[in-house]
Amino acid sequence: MFRSDLLQDKRVLITGGGSGLGKSLGRRVLELGARLVICGRRADKLDATRAEFDAEFPGRTATHVCDIRDSEAVEAMLEAIWQDGPLDALVNNAAGNFLAKSEELSPRAFDAVTSIVLNGTAYVTLGCGRRWIAEARGGTVLSIVATYAWTGSAYVTPSACAKAGVRALTQSLAVEWGDRGIRLNAVAPGPFPTEGAWDRLVPTQELEDTWRNRIPPKRFGEHGELADLAVFLLADQSSYVNGEVVAIDGGEWLKGAGQFNFMEALTEDQWDAINPKRKKG
Ligand code: HXC
């Protein structure tokens, strides 16, 4: 889909890039010539991913152990990264989430999710933006949100609050920093199977089957599909796209929203009864 040098020598930080969607996206930006920095909480996971990437793209990946909930740790990481030169792009991918009845959430449980998804994302984004502004150079931020950043969602209230906050962060800073050559966009993925999210959010086969059936094309997303959308939004060629949130979910959220969408459950006989004038093909 893209020229192989689309991101040549762009320096890209992906938070939570040691696993899941962040790792898939990391591989894709390396394939397109970027230099990659990944951060995460666990050194072993980061080291394993770097070793994997180094085998294919030697010396192109750096790692930083960093819990983005800790603003001082974020500053220390950004200082260390900038010692080797500025970043060109940031991907806010790190997240936390679990299914819970909201009335059962403890304050610490609420904070556990929002402190990663909203506060952590803000710390890294503001830290990169400050540096880009001080150096009078541009930069690109891409955040991974969720379609419930627009709609909210039962049973993942902390994540929905935080993802809506990241959408607001994206739209606010896209305007505030737009004249500084900094642009911010987000993607809102539907279900893309990953170990971290699937274990927590789709723990049984029955839930997985119910979910798949709700999606118009009756399938989950493939990581490469999300990675290619992300790459498009990171590339200089999309520089007029700013403050946008792009859904990539096979139409899943619209399926839940359209007033008459439930009628797909009607049988032919029921259609005959409610619309005697219908012309059958
Ligand atoms: C209720 C829970 C809980 C659960 C933790 N807590 N898990 N409460 N149900 N399943 C509570 C704990 O009891 C504790 O509160 C508080 O949260 C902090 O728990 P810790 O285990 O100390 O937190 P921590 O180790 O920091 O773990 C963070 C986490 C965890 C968010 C809770 O799930 C995590 O590390 N996740 C990272 C990976 C991940 O979630 N990936 C999926 C992202 S998917 P008390 O009061 O007891 O002290 C995504 C979008 C999906 O974001 C979109 C799908 C389409």
Image (tube, rainbow, N blue to C red):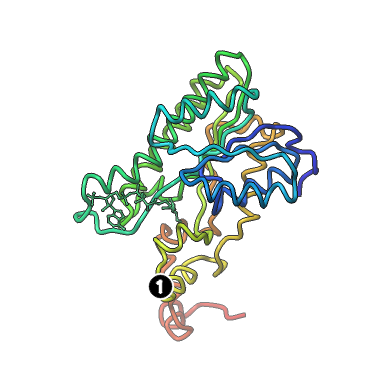
Most extreme residue toward the bottom is 269
Residue, disc 1: 204
Q: Is residue 99 left or right of residue 233?
A: left
Q: In this view, does 30 lie above or below 236?
A: below
Q: Position of residue 214 (x, y in %)?
A: 46, 68
Q: Residue at x 57, y 60 (%)?
A: 221
Whether the residue carrying mark 1 lies under 8 Å from ligand 1 is answered with no
Q: Nearer the viewer, residue 226 or 50?
A: 50
Within 10 Å of disc 1 (Cα), the crowding (few <14, some 14-19, many 20+) is few
Q: Which residue is drawn at 65% across and 38% down?
A: 36
Q: Position of residue 77 (x, y in %)?
A: 51, 29
Q: Is residue 5 above or below residue 239?
A: below
Q: Is residue 181 left or right of residue 208?
A: right
Q: Nearer the viewer, residue 92 or 71?
A: 71
**Count of picture labels:** 1
Q: Is residue 257 left or right of residue 142?
A: left
Q: Where is residue 206 in the image (x, y as percent from the top left)?
A: 41, 76
Q: Which image quadrant is residue 114 in?
A: top left
Q: In this view, does 26 lie above or below 213?
A: above
Q: Where is residue 125 in the image (x, y as percent from the top left)?
A: 49, 29
Q: Residue at x 62, y 44 (%)?
A: 230
Q: Residue at x 55, y 64 (%)?
A: 220
Q: Which image quadrant is residue 73 in?
A: top left
Q: Nearer the viewer, residue 117 or 260?
A: 117
| Amino acid type indicated by mark 1 | Thr
Q: Name the element at disc 1.
A: loop
The image quadrant where one finds the C terminus is bottom right
